[in-house]
Structures are given as C-alpha cells and as structure tokens.
Image (cartoon, grey):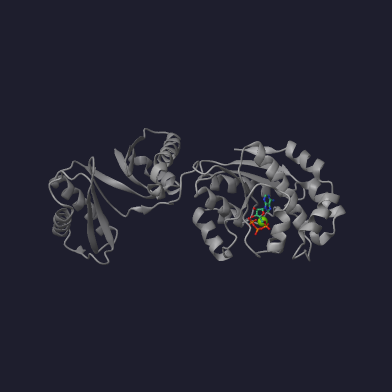
Amino acid sequence: MTGIWLLKPGELTLKGDNRKSFEGVLKSNIQRLFNMLDCNVKLKFTSGRYYVHAPLDKSQAVENILSHLIGISGWAKTVTCEKNEQDVLAACVEEGKKIYKSGARTFKIDARRTDKSFPLSSYELCCKAGDAVCGAVDELKVDIHSPHDVIKIEIREKAFVYSGGKKGLGGLPAGTAGRGMLLLSGGIDSPVAGFLMASRGMIIDAIHFHSYPYTSLEAKQKVIDLARITGEYCMGIRLYILNFIKVQTRIKEKAPFPWSTVLLRMAMMEAAEKTAAKIKCKCLITGESLSQVASQTIENLTCTQNRIKLPVLRPLIGVNKEDIINSAKKIGTYNVSIQPYKDCCVLFNPAHPVLRGDFMEANAIYEELNLGELIDDALQNYELVK
Ligand code: ATP
Ligand code: MG
C-alpha cells in the first residue's frame, strides 16, 4: 500500500525571478534524501505543491526526513482519491472517524479548489463535506471558529484529503547560500548556530579543535555525534577535527595566563579560516552570544576576529541562553551537548580571564607566541569525518 505526502514549499514562494533556481535546489535536495530510503519512492513536483509517494510501512522514515527538511513550510499525509463528489465526501468521512478516535469533538472543513473545473465551489464543498462527516459521526460538531481539528480538501490533479498537517522547518533550501565553516565545540550553542545558518540555505562544513590526551576520546565522539545530528538538517556535514594540544600548550607556557582563552580563540579562528579557504567556505560561523562568558564580551570578540578576513557570522549573538537551549532541544542536539565530556581541559582555563581585552595588545601577545608552525602542523594532520 502506498501513501502520499503533500509538501508545501516555504519562503521560496517569495523569490520572484529567482524562484526557479531555489525550487531546483529544493527538489534536488528532496530527491537526494529520498534516494537514501531503501524502497520505491516516487516524487512529483507541481507548481506550489510537491508529492512523495512511498510505501505505507515506510511512513516513519518518510516523516523523519520531512521533519528535517529545510525549505518546506508544511506537510501532511493525505488520503488521495478521484476528483468526484462521492469519493471526496467518503474520504472526508474516513478522516472524520480518524480525528474522532483521536479525541476530536469539533472540526471544520477547509476546501481549496485549484482545479476550477470541479463542479462545486470551495464553499459548497465545505458545506457538503461538513454535513457528510456530521451525518456519519454523531458526536462530531462543526465549530468554524476554534475547531479541535481541521479536515482539509485540496482539489488539484487529484483530490487530497487530510487533517493534522505538520508545520515544516521553513527557511531556504541547503545550497542556495554558499558554504560556511562552523566552529563546532561540544557545547549547546554551536550546533544551534549551525542549524540557524543552514536554515538560511547555507551548506555547513564544521571544524573542531580538541586537546587529546588532555581531553577524552568521548569528548571527540560527542562532537562527531553533534555534527551528525546537525547534518541531518543540512544535507550532511563534513567535520574537520584538529588536535590543538601543541598550540594550547605553547599559549599556556608563554602567554600571560588571563589571556589564554582569548588567544586560543584567535588561533582557532586562524586555523578555521585557513581550512575554509581550502574548501571554498565564504564565512566562519560560531555559537557566540554577547557576554555569555568572558571570552564573548564585545572587546574580546573584537580580539578574536581581528586577524582574519572572512566574515564571522554569529547567529546567536543576541539570543538568550534559555532560548538557545529550547532550540537545541527542538533540533535534538541538547541531550548530546550536556554529556559531561569537556572539550577543553580545565588546566588551560584561567580562573580570572581578561574581560575587556585590547585588540592591539592581543595582537602583540599573539605574534610573540609564533604559533604559525604549530597551527600548520595541526592543519596538516586533520581528521575528516563525513
Ligand atoms: P558552545 O556551547 O557552542 O560550546 P560556549 O558557550 O561553550 O559555546 P565558548 O566555549 O566560549 O562558548 O565557545 C564559543 C564558540 O567558539 C563556540 O560556540 C564555538 O563556535 C567556538 N568553539 C569553542 N570551542 C571550540 C572547539 N573546541 N572547537 C571548535 N570551535 C570551538
Ligand atoms: Mg563551548
């Protein structure tokens, strides 16, 4: 048995002349994702609606893909029938029984007739379908103002009937806004930052710096897991993993201790920018949020980025921690992020860090450290996880 899912493209409907190219990317993303399902899936694209035909026993896998798909504003599993009054009303009655079983006592019908040759107007169809449902399920009442459920009818190439449509992620399809390089730590914030940029159409590559053996292998695995979960929203992520222990040790040995976090961030930015240049990323992305920790005061953020040329995007800069946590829960990264494996050893964290670093001073200290060779060494020995 085959089910049909109806997908509504999101914001790209606003794209005017560029709409075709945005649609092209969305369609090829959908195609790629469903090609990975090991079964017979048929996709059909019409203007304004896309359809996925898939075996009903794959419903869960289909819906898992749709709930991660950036670029659609909503989707619904439909009952599909011929475009005649009798079949449409019968489908509505079945839908009515279904919503009644799941607890609804009130409903309304919402009909749309894209095919104007259908003999009933949308209004007439609503009235007839409403009567048919009430006639079949005594306890269900029409409430047009605040119904428990809405049964939707769309008369297009065929008739589609559904209720309980799901809200999609919206945004713009991955691949319409170039590549960005996400600095991915094991924390809560950076996966959310990556997701937000992915939902503006960016393809995300990620880079992570670890300090093995001062940090554990579990901490590294945690970051790989975060990249995998975040990657489900952006057509996969390539994760570059670099060992930064030599850089960190040099900073610890040679620089004034209160400066060490800022200097480490500066070195991370330098390595991230060099990696980004090799793989054509057009910006860096971080999970920084203004004043969340000492290294994220406006002065220290200025120190961190002042030696690099690529733009640094910080989608969380004005977002409160509680809202970031809620987003992390929504995208499914939170429970991994809170695993207790630290991505930075406490030995390297000063108890009293510089709070408002002067970037000229930061630069001078940074240059004294001669980190170039150590950074190049880390860059040459990266590990790549796809
Ligand atoms: P997060 O929750 O993302 O770890 P945070 O609140 O812990 O953020 P910091 O540890 O100061 O903040 O890191 C700020 C940002 O710097 C992170 O969001 C991330 O983009 C980047 N970053 C920090 N540590 C690393 C790391 N080990 N590897 C790659 N990027 C990192
Ligand atoms: Mg962190």
Nearer the observer, 335 or 312: 312
Q: Residue furthest front?
A: 17
Up/down of 58 relative to 150, above or below: above
**How far across and how far down the image is residue 165, in percent?**
33, 53
Identify the image quadrant of the C terminus: top right
**How far across and how far down the image is residue 63, in percent?**
40, 46
Number of marks: 0
Nearer the observer, 187 or 56: 187
- Horizontally, is 349 left or right of 141 in the view? right
**How far across and how far down the image is residue 225, in percent?**
59, 46
**Location of residue 281 (image quadrant):** top right
Taking the image in four quarters, ligand 2 sits in the one at: bottom right
- Horizontally, is 11 left or right of 196 in the view? left
Up/down of 30 relative to 107, above or below: above
Nearer the observer, 6 or 114: 114
Identify the image quadrant of the N terminus: top left
- Horizontally, is 243 left or right of 27 in the view? right
**How far across and how far down the image is residue 36, in percent?**
45, 35
**Location of residue 137 (image quadrant):** bottom left
Residue at position x 77%, y 50% in the image: 214
- Horizontally, is 118 left or right of 280 in the view? left
